Image (cartoon, rainbow, N blue to C red):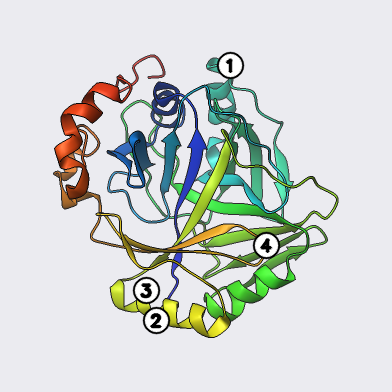
Amino acid sequence: MKLITGLHHVTAITGNAQENIDFYTGVLGLRLVKKTVNFDYSEVYHFYFGDEYGTPGTIMTTFPYGKDLINGRHGKGMLNTTAFSVSIEALDYWMNRLDQFNINYKQPQQRFSDEVFIYLEDFDGLGLELVFNSKDERKGYKNGYILDGYTLKGIHHVEIWLDAYERTAALLTTQMDHKIISETPDRLRLGTEDLPGKYVDLLSTPSALKGLAGRGTVHHVAFATPDAATQLEMVERLNAYGLEHTEVKDRKYFTSVYFKEPGGVLFEIATSGPGFDADEELAFLGEDLQLPPQFEEQRPHLTEVLPKINYPTEKYR
């Protein structure tokens, strides 16, 4: 059995909380599956966006620290682009939708033999792609306002820039159950399977500036493991490989172990359960502020200091 089954989520450092809600649920049409707080700094929200269930591999999460947070810089040693998977038939629809809401994007480009993609950025400058392909059987979130069958199906791949990608590729292929899927002179695609939601793209960019953390950059990428037992097996692999890591952290909806890969990107190993319905019913995911037990006594204070948000966002429907 594979200890790593694919991507779990991507977590970004962002600015304004309402703009996060507007972009990811309004423009992109994802579901807000959880409204909680940063478990390491409770006065900042932690939003989780994904499909109807918050299925691993569909989840984008944000820490909206506020508009005063200094902008980061895309560059090497960083995950610079998170790509979402969309039906191949939806290209014109999405270009029209982005035009409708004045979202700037680059014109469609071809990658490998079976992908067309467009690059865009969210309201914080976070690098995103929509990848139009015919491989993805996931259904996406039927939100009632994006044409059925044209919704985002989940994460397609993540793109990491590195001085050189050999050591990162070695970690992924020897310890994290990835294999080479495709290769071009400037891109190495690895995956646990040849399916969207399973891919990591590595780019060798020695002449690029070093990336700087801040608003509009990715904090970490999480890889999915089935359960606590497989997570501990992964910890044993990390120990044998000589990589330092955190203890297992309880994130309520999954447990996590964090470590830096050789190129400097923060990786997480996250369990696939217990899932986002652990503290609220599926039909009502994301509607109320959910807190871990250690912060529950702070609820009156947090309700006061956290920004007020409007959800759902009506202007993009």
Instruction: Look at discs 4 and 1 and give the one toward the viewer.
Output: 4
Distance from the alpha carbon under mark 4 to that under mark 1 = 36 Å
Classify 10 Å Cα crowding around label 4: few (below 14), some (14-19), many (20 and above). some
Mark 1 highlights which residue? 102
Q: Which mark is residue 231?
A: 3
**Callout 3 secondary element:** helix
Q: Which mark is residue 233?
A: 2
Q: Is residue 2 visible?
A: no
The foreground one among 62 and 286 is 62
Residue drawn where x is 48% and y is 69% of the image: 245
Amino acid, disc 1: Asn
Q: Are marks 4 and 1 in contact (CB under 8 Å)?
A: no
Q: Is residue 262 left or right of residue 149?
A: right
Among the two numbered marks 2 and 4 on one chain, the one whose residue lies closer to the N terminus:
2
Among the two numbered marks 4 and 1 on one chain, the one whose residue lies closer to the N terminus:
1
Distance from the alpha carbon under mark 2 to that under mark 4 = 23 Å
Mark 4 highlights which residue? 263
Instruction: Look at discs 1 and 3 and give the one toward the viewer.
Output: 3
Classify 10 Å Cα crowding around label 3: few (below 14), some (14-19), many (20 and above). many
Distance from the alpha carbon under mark 4 to that under mark 3 = 22 Å
Instruction: Point out residue 163 in the picture as x, y percentages from the top left corner.
Output: 78, 59
Q: Is residue 171 visible?
A: yes
Instruction: Point out residue 90 in the picture as x, y percentages from the top left corner.
Output: 53, 36
